[in-house]
Amino acid sequence: MNKQTLFGTFLAAALFCGCQSSKVKISGRFVGNDASKVYLEQLSPLSPSIVDSTVLAEDGSYEFRLKEVPPTPMLYNLIYNEERIPLLLAGGDRLTVSSVGSVVRNYTVEGSVESDLLRQFYQAFVAGAQQLDQLAARFADPELTEQERKELASEYTAEYYRIRREQLRFIIENKSSLAAVYALYQRLPGDAYLFNGDSDVVYYRTVAEALEQSYPESPYLQTLLAEITRMDARMNLASRITEAEYPDLELMDIYGKKVRLSSLAGKVILLDFWSAELGTSNALNADLKEIYRKYADAPVGFEVYQVAIDTSKPLWINAVQEQQLPWISVSDLRGRGSAALGLYNVQKLPTNFLIDKEGVIVARDIRGEELEKKLDELTRL
């Protein structure tokens, strides 16, 4: 699996340390593939760049020698057969990196504690992501029964959360390593956050505090501290939002288009949190459709912004289409890890919030006749 999104914005801000450099040797063997060249990629502050390449010998062996490598580990990728092996290289390292067959699944690292820790995380993470891809592909089979679809969705959700738990466990258990920093920035397909948006700051802070003892000179520590400052600032801002300025959301609809909650300003809005996977909101959706039709031509516009707390895109889209939901349906496909839950302090599903045309949250968990009565009042001119 080609993972080129490693470290994301984290790397873009990192600065190389200017302390005394030294040499690094990387050697090993790659067998079982047709590719003949190996590349070494440096993840620099501005962009990844190939710093060296070599042709495999007849027995699959290769060797790289680097000069002026800082004593604090920096991130590189060894690229073979279009697959990347992440390495944390420090001046003086003598690494042996080898693989037989599938590169990412089978590679071994000797000679670097940080790079071997990175291997332990990376191989498990990639294997999990590939398993999710396979489950998603099976879900697309049009011949699946409804029961088989539900079982696949359940399997996908269980695997998704298993990967996330293992990722967080690795970060906490190895918090003083730079491999933990790498793990902080890895995302499963469709994920923008580690776990729960800006509340992830607890994990970033845990690693940063440990790195201040183990790698105080690392440029990655400084970037991590800067990221923590930004996350704290956003959380402080969110905590000061008044009811008249509800927390805004921007999520993807079923067509992949981003829709902002604030784009509905001036209308009465029902912000509704539900889950297609749970299947407990079908009857409520049916009732809400009747109310939605009743107020379609009200003097003050009424709209539903419904957030699906799901992880399976096919299951969510299928539910929206089967139930013919006429309103705005969005999701970040992060399930219980959705940042939207934290912003609105949602503890259970379904949950809704009624927002008047002035942007004031006037009711929570309002349904049926009570909702209609309130809409009669709010949609009048």
Image (spheres, rainbow, N blue to C red):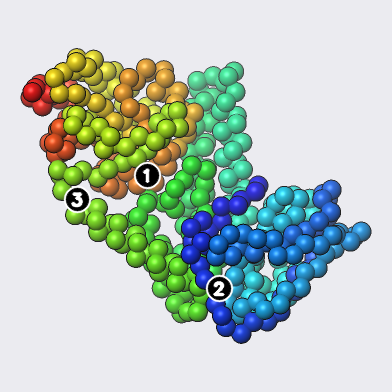
* Residue denoted by label 2: 16
* Residue denoted by label 1: 338
Front tag of 1 and 3:
3
Instruction: Find the distance from the CA under tag 2 to the CA under tag 1.
Output: 34 Å
Disc on res. 241: 3
For the C terminus, the quadrant is: top left
- Discs 3, 2 touching: Cβ within 8 Å: no
Instruction: Name the one closer to the observer, 138 or 73.
Output: 73
Q: Residue at x 52, y 25 (%)?
A: 149
Residue 117 position within the rendered picture, expressed as x and y whole percent measured from the top left: 60, 66
Instruction: Give the image quarter of residue 367.
Output: top left
Label 2 sits on a secondary structure element that is loop
Of the image marks 3 and 2, the number of the one nearer the N terminus: 2
Residue 43 position within the rendered picture, expressed as x and y whole percent measured from the top left: 60, 63
Of the image marks 1 and 3, the number of the one nearer the N terminus: 3
Residue 304 shows in the view? yes
Instruction: Name the one closer to the observer, 25 or 115.
Output: 25
Instruction: Give the image quarter of residue 109.
Output: bottom right
Q: Is residue 139 above or below residue 169?
A: above
Q: Residue at x 72, y 56 (%)?
A: 79
The amino acid beneath tag 1 is: Ser
Label 1 sits on a secondary structure element that is loop
Residue 274 position within the rendered picture, expressed as x and y whole percent measured from the top left: 32, 32
Mark 3 crowd level (few <14, some 14–19, many ≥20, 10 Å Cα): few
Mark 1 crowd level (few <14, some 14–19, many ≥20, 10 Å Cα): many
